[in-house]
């Protein structure tokens, strides 16, 4: 259960550090004022979009077009292992990718509680751009100077982040390209895409 102070902080355009199934994340609402704060906190260039965390690809369909094969692929691997870059239903803030938006189905219970409370949230790593995130949301949030009510405790396995896949739908069908190898190896992506199971 999120505290009223945490809920008010988020609804007021604040940023929250939270645990994920890989690395600590930073959540804000996907609106201009909150994104201003997020990008300032991370010292991230505005031309480097952040991804959105969702409960499911069904929820993501309010924001992006999800091909059936992508839905099948997401279900075939551990939840939270992929971030999919997909065509937006309508262009969003450029800091969310504009016409091409990255979405990740969050697996950690605390991360999912945030999305259940607020809807889609940002799912960028909890660190200044170029820095390595800490192992816990507490340490990451403290490093960024967040107040205690803006830090949701939880250990993260660490290691690699999610595997980022660029998905393009054209007349030839659906094509996928590994943009960043993460917790799911590129070879597993290629093998599954050639022979879905």
Image (cartoon, rainbow, N blue to C red):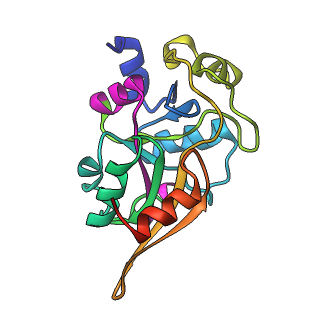
Which residue extends farthest bottom? 171
Q: With respect to residue 50, does 176 lie above or below? A: below
Q: With respect to residue 74, does 191 lie above or below? A: below
Range of residues picked out in magenta: 95-117
Instruction: Return the residue nearer the eye: 136 or 184.
Output: 184
Q: Position of residue 114 (x, y in %)?
A: 36, 28
Residue 154 as seen in the image, left or right of residue 58: right
Q: Is residue 181 visible?
A: yes
Q: With respect to residue 128, does 109 lie above or below? A: above
Q: With respect to residue 116, does 9 lie above or below? A: above
Numbered label tally: 0
**Which quadrant is home to the N terminus?**
top left
**Which quadrant is home to the C terminus?**
bottom left
Q: Is residue 30 visible?
A: no
Q: Position of residue 7 (x, y in %)?
A: 36, 20
Instruction: Return the residue nearer the eye: 143 or 154.
Output: 154
Locate residue 155: give its quadrant: top right
Tell me what residue is drawn at x 56 percent, y 64 percent. 178
Tell me what residue is drawn at x 62 percent, y 22 percent. 141
Which residue extends farthest right? 131
Residue 61 part of the magenta-drawn span: no
Tell me what residue is drawn at x 59 percent, y 33 percent. 23
Residue 30 as seen in the image, left or right of residue 154: left
Instruction: Return the residue nearer the eye: 154 or 193.
Output: 193
Residue 52 as seen in the image, left or right of residue 153: left
Instruction: Return the residue nearer the eye: 167 or 123.
Output: 167
Tell me what residue is drawn at x 51 percent, y 30 percent. 15
Q: Position of residue 41 (x, y in %)?
A: 64, 35
């Amino acid at each position: 259960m999120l505290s009223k102070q945490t809920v008010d902080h988020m609804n007021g355009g604040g940023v929250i550090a939270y645990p994920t199934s890989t690395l600590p994340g930073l959540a804000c609402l996907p609106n201009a004022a909150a994104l201003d704060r997020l990008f300032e906190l991370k010292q991230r260039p505005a031309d480097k979009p952040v991804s959105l965390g969702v409960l499911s690809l069904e929820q993501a369909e309010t924001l992006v077009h999800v091909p059936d094969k992508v839905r099948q692929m997401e279900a075939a691997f551990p939840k939270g292992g992929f971030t999919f870059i997909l065509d937006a239903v309508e262009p969003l803030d450029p800091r969310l990718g504009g016409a091409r938006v990255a979405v990740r189905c969050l697996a950690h219970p605390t991360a999912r509680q945030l999305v259940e409370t607020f809807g889609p949230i940002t799912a960028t790593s909890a660190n200044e751009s170029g820095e390595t995130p800490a192992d816990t949301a507490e340490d990451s949030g403290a490093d960024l100077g967040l107040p205690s009510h803006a830090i949701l405790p939880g250990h993260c396995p660490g290691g690699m982040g999610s595997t980022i896949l660029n998905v393009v739908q054209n007349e030839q069908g659906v094509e996928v390209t590994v943009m960043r190898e993460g917790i799911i190896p590129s070879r597993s992506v290629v093998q599954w895409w050639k022979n879905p199971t």
